[in-house]
Image (spheres, rainbow, N blue to C red):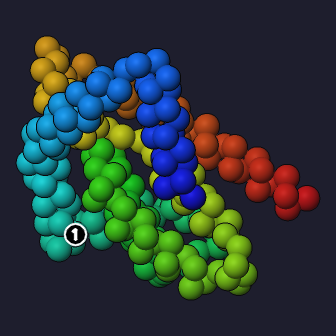
Amino acid sequence: MVSYIWLFLILIGIGFSALTGNLDTINDSILTNGTKALDLMLSILPIIVLWTGIMKIAEVSGLLRKFAKLMEPILSRLFPSVPKDNPALGFIASNIAANMMGLGSAATPFGLKAMSELQKINDKKDTASVAMITFLVLNTAGVTIVPTTVLALRIATGSQNPSEIILPGVIATFCSSIGGLLLDYFIRRRNNK
């Protein structure tokens, strides 16, 4: 479905450019922006690889399991339907840790594993469980302490002070997490009545 949306947007852009006589602008944009995109990807790749490697070391060394144990009191309240010994809680904690470091690409495998484990204990296989919905809210609106990818993008584009976004980012993601979890709680509570 998304591919159709992109195709539609591209065709609209090309059609509009043809009608306004700006086809040469599209050609120039395609040729120059492709190179710029590649340069940007190559400049942020080392930072993403470094932090992904650190997360892998943390996983192999057991640091993520320790983080999961530390998060257990909070996670057991957020996910009361998930048994305490279920591996999903460890994957959820790992996902949270990766997202806190601003590593969405490193958090994705943990999120997929968490959803897979949550699906195993889901009674209705064709419907998302309450725990799955809560995890999705937490994953989407999660607190980011170090926005690694955004910092890498700011450095790559020549920002004078790339780290000035850390505090506003922490505040914004903290507020979005609290807001998302409160909304999830109130909707869940309303549906249970």
Viewer can see residue 48: yes
In which quadrant of the rendered image does the C terminus lie?
bottom right
In the rendered image of this protein, does residue 10 appear above or below residue 28?
below
| Residue behind mark 1 | 59
Above or below for 136 versus 116: above
Q: Residues within 10 Å of mark 1 (few under 14, many from 20)?
A: some
User: Relative to residue 90, is residue 43 drawn left or right?
Assistant: left
Q: Residue at x 46, y 18 (%)?
A: 20
Q: Amino acid at mark 1?
A: Glu
Image-quadrant location for residue 10: top left
* Residue 49 image point, x, y percent: 13, 55
Q: Is residue 133 left or right of residue 32?
A: right
Q: Is residue 174 above or below residue 84?
A: above
Q: On the image, which quarter does residue 162 sit in?
A: top left
Q: Position of residue 53 (x, y in %)?
A: 13, 60
- Please tell me which residue lies in front, 11 or 53: 11
Query: Which x, y percent locates residue 29?
Result: 26, 29
Count of labels shown? Answer: 1
Give SS at disc 1. helix
Residue drawn at x 43%, y 79% as measured from the top left = 87
* Relative horizontal placement of residue 102, taking residue 161 as reference (left or right): right
Depth check: give the residue in front, 115 or 19.
19
The residue that appears at 17% across and 49% down in the rendered structure is 48
> What residue lies at 49% left-to-right and 23% top-to-bottom?
19
**The N terminus sits in image quarter:** bottom right
Q: Is residue 28 above or below residue 76?
A: above
Instruction: Let me know if residue 146 appears in the view.
Output: no
Find the residue positioned furthest to the top: 160
